[in-house]
């Protein structure tokens, strides 16, 4: 039997990397990652190499079934130089150390855009819909836009085996969110990137664009931006039962504001304004159940006797989850308890 292997990678686009993909055929494929061969591609066409030396390598790192194609698999890869060393654009390879003791729950927000009007679904050409209020978790044709596409993507993620845990319409018209939970920086990042790929590809069938920019409507308009809120915990946080541990972690994050913002997504200054459920990009705060803080301490963590997670609300919707997770782990590990 012949199987289709869809190799997915991140290109060299600046300031935000874009997804690329191509398909190869494998005979009698086992479905296992270790049986996916390293493949090459033309880096000069993806802003990753010059034409005089354009061959780069795709190293498979994650595999799952492709439920939207017959006899097919989705293969997430990382980009390597011809000598097998990580390419400069390979953020995954620069994760210092994997640790599945760290759990991540990413809340991936995005906008569905009409490619003709270059406005979110639900926005009339040259104008605006009703102000924010009825769209979050809304129901009805005047409040919800693009549900058919969102539901199809949800089903595809589940059928692919991705650990997607929910979906909801978001605060702005044409804005949606899904959540993915995974253990370890690599695995969480792999699943987010594959889920983004499935969303982009599914949107093609509907003639709709996915807008990942954190503030596509501009910071001066009264519409929410899009984030990729990062919920995280490690074994100590899940079991300590000690408010001082969570306070120490939150305080540690305040020591590395530029380092976090650097990897939390391009254009994030337009979203982190102190309005629309954000803290200002040049300020730092944390608080229980505070969606206007940099880091929210969920009320569930407190009610469970100070056992659970924290939510860094600063990562933007276009942020690289590999880099976000790696930076969070590094900061948490620096806490002196």
Image: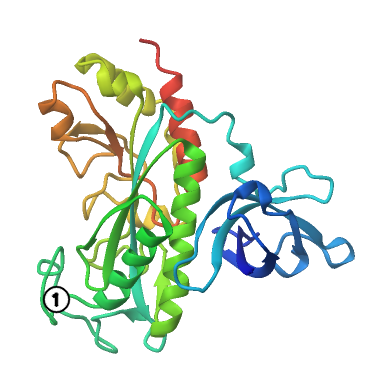
- Whole-percent x, y for residue 25 in the image: 68, 69
The residue that appears at 40% across and 30% down in the rendered structure is: 102
Q: Which quarter of the figure is the C terminus placed in?
A: top left
- SS at circle 1: loop
Using the rendered view, name the quadrant where residue 160 is placed. bottom left
Q: How is the image coloured?
A: rainbow
Q: Residues within 10 Å of mark 1 (few under 14, many from 20)?
A: many
In screen coordinates, is 321 left or right of 30?
Answer: left
Tell me: residue 121, above or below residue 234: below
Residue 207: quarter of image: bottom left
- Locate residue 319, reporting x and y percent: 46, 52
85 vs 328, nearest the viewer: 85
Name the outermost residue toward the right: 52
Q: How many marks?
A: 1
Which residue sits at x=73%, y=70%?
45
Residue plotted at (83% across, 51% down):
82
User: Does residue 77 appear in the picture of this structure?
Assistant: yes
Q: Is residue 214 above or below residue 237?
A: below
Horizontally, is 109 left or right of 263 in the view? left
In this view, the residue in front, 315 or 60, is 60
Question: Residue beneath label 1, please?
Answer: 143
Q: Quadrant of residue 6?
A: bottom right
Name the spot of residue 311 as percent of width and height, x first.
28, 38
250 relative position to 262: left or right: left
Camera-side residue of 126 and 139:
139
- Would residue 320 be seen by someone viewing this image from the given angle? no
Q: Residue at x 25, y 15 (%)?
A: 240
**Image quarter in which the N terminus is found:** bottom right
> How far across and how far down the image is residue 34, in percent?
66, 46
């Amino acid at each position: 039997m012949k199987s289709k292997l869809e190799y997915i990678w991140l290109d060299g686009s600046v300031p935000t990397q874009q997804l690329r993909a191509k398909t190869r055929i494998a005979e009698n494929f086992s479905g296992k990652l270790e049986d996916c061969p390293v493949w090459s591609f033309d880096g000069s066409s993806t802003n990753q190499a010059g034409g005089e030396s354009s061959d780069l390598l795709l190293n498979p790192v994650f595999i799952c079934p492709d439920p939207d194609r017959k006899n097919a698999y989705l293969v997430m890869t990382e980009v390597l130089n011809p000598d097998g060393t990580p390419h400069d654009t390979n953020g995954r390879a620069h994760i210092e150390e994997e640790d599945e003791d760290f759990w991540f729950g990413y809340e991936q927000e995005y906008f569905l855009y009409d490619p003709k009007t270059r406005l979110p679904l639900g926005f009339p050409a040259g104008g605006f819909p009703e102000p924010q209020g009825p769209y979050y978790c809304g129901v009805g044709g005047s409040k919800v836009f693009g549900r058919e596409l969102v539901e199809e993507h949800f089903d595809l993620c589940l059928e692919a085996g991705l650990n997607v845990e929910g979906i909801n319409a978001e605060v702005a018209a044409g804005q949606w969110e899904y959540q993915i939970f995974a253990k370890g920086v690599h695995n969480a990042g792999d699943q987010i990137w594959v889920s983004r790929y499935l969303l982009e590809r599914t949107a093609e069938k509907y003639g709709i664009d996915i807008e990942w920019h954190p503030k596509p409507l501009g910071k001066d308009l009264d519409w929410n931006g899009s984030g990729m809120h990062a919920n995280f915990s490690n074994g100590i946080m899940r079991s300590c039962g000690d408010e001082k541990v969570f306070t120490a972690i939150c305080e540690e994050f305040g020591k590395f504001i530029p380092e976090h913002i650097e990897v939390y997504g391009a254009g994030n200054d337009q979203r982190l304004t102190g309005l629309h459920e954000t803290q200002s990009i040049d300020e730092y705060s944390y608080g229980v159940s505070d969606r206007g803080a940099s880091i929210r301490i969920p009320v569930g963590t407190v009610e469970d006797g100070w056992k659970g997670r924290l939510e860094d609300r600063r990562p933007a919707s276009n942020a690289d989850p590999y880099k976000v997770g790696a930076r969070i782990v590094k900061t948490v590990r620096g806490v002196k308890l």
